[in-house]
Amino acid sequence: MEILNLIRESFAHHIIFSAGLLLIMGFIMGHLSEKIKLPSITGYIFAGILLGEAGINLIHADNIDQLNILSEITLSFIAVIIGCEFSFTKLRAYGKKVVIITLAQMFLTFGLISAGLIMLGLSTYVAFILGAIGAATAPAATVVIVEKLRAKGEFVDYLYGIVALDDAGTVILFSIAFAIASAEISGTEVNFWIGLIHASKEILLSVILGITGGTLIHFTTRNSKNMGEMKIITLGIIFLTTSVCISLHLSPLIANMTVGMLLVNLSHKNIRIMKALQPLTPPLYAIFFTIAGTELHLKIFTSSTALIAGIVFIIMRAIGKYSGVYATGHLLKLKPSISNWLGLALLPQAGVAIGLVLFVQGSSVVTEASPAIQLQITEMINIVLMSVFFNEVLGPPLAKIAIRKNLRRR
C-alpha cells in the first residue's frame, strides 16, 4: 500500500505516466486473456478496471478525461474501417437483406427492453430512452476481433453492414425517444416530428461532412506514392472531420463511416491508405478499451433497483439482438451458419451507449428537472453502465465464437 501511495503522489498526476501505465497493463492483461482463449479486448477492459477507481486507483480522473481524446481518434479509425467494407458491389449483393435484419433486431430490442422495464415499474420515458440506447452496438469490439482473426467473407460483410446501419438507426430512434421523454419531463406537448427532423438533420450533415472528408483524402493522395505523405494527409483530414462533428454535435461515427465508404468506392487503390494506417491501430485499440475499463465502477452492483433493472435490460437486449437476426435471417434464407451466429456478434456494447446516456445527463431538460427525475436519470445511467460492463466482458468472447464459426482468413 505504501508503494501504491508513493506512486499516486509522485507520478499518477502526470498524463504521460497514465498513458504508459494503461498501455503496459493493457498489453499484459490482453496477452493473459489470449492465453486462456479470450479476446485481448477482455483483458484490456480488466486492466482498466484494475487501474481505475474500482481497483488500485492509479489513474487520475482528470487524466482519463484528457485521454478520452484518444478514444475519439480510435473510434474515428474504426468507423473508417467499417466504411471501407461498404463497397457498392457488396451493397448490391446484401444491401436489402442488411437493412431488413438491422431494422428487425433494432426495433425488437427497443420494444423488448422498453416493455420489460415498464413492467418492472420504471417510468415510460426512462424505459423508452433505455430501449433506444439498448439498440446500439459497439463497432470497436467488432472491428478489433475481425482484424485480430483476419476474418473475411459473407458473415463479416453482414456483420459490418448491420453494425454501421444500426448506429445510424439508433441515432434516429434515440432522438425520437428523447424528444418524447423531454416533453414528458418538462410537461409540454410531445412533438414526434421535431425529434425525427432533428435526427435526420444530424445524420444528413454527418454524411455531408464525411463525403467532403473522403473526397479530399482521395484527390490529395491518389497520385502519391509516398506512404508517409498519405498518412499525414489522411490523419489530418480524419482529425478535422471528427473535430468538426464533435463541435457541431453531429456523429463522428457516421461521418467517418462515410469517409471509408467513399474511399473504397472511388478507387480500389485507396485500400493502400488503410494499410498505411494499420500499424497505428494496435496501441490505439489497447488504450481505448483500457480507458473504457477505468470508467466502469463496480459500485453499480450495490443498488438493488439498478441491479434488477440492469439484469432485465441485459436479458431483453440479448433476446432482441439474437432473435431479431435469427428470425429475419431464416426468413431471408441466409445460410444457417450466418442466421444462427450473427446475433451473438452484436452483443458488445460500449462507447455509443455511454455517449447517449451522458447526452441525456447533460441536457438542459434534465439538469433543470426536479430532484426526483434527476434520481431516475442517475438510476438509468447505472443500468446502462451495468449493461456495458456485462456486455464488454462477455460480449467479445461470444462475438469471437460467432466469427470463428464462419471464419475465412484474409
Image (cartoon, helix red, strand yellow):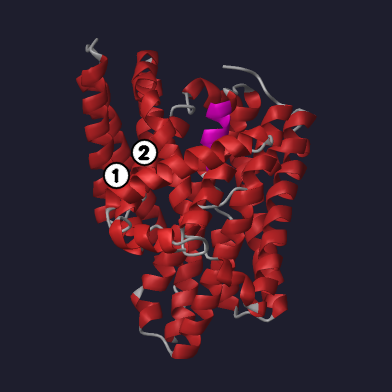
Amino acid type, callout 1: Thr
Asked if disc 2 and disc 1 are in contact, CB closer than 8 Å, the reply is yes
| Neighbours of disc 2 within 10 Å: few (<14), some (14-19), many (20+) | many
Tell me the crowding category of disc 1: few under 14, some 14 to 19, or many 20 or more residues within 10 angstroms, Cα based. many
Q: Please provide percent x and percent y for residue 184.
A: 49, 82
Residue type pointed to by label 2: Asn
Q: Main secondary structure of the magenta part?
A: helix
Q: Is residue 245 above or below residue 178?
A: above
User: In the drawing, what numbered circle is on residue 410?
Assistant: none
Residue 256, numbered circle: 2
> Residue tagged by mark 1?
242
- 2 or 1: tag closer to the N-terminus: 1
Q: State whether residue 399 is above or below residue 351.
A: above
Q: Quadrant of the C terminus?
A: top right
Q: Is residue 365 left or right of residue 230?
A: right
Q: CA distance from mark 2 to mark 1?
A: 7 Å
Q: Which residues are magenta?
A: 141-148
- Residue placed at 59% from the left, 50% from the top? 392
Residue 230's quadrant in the figure?
A: top left
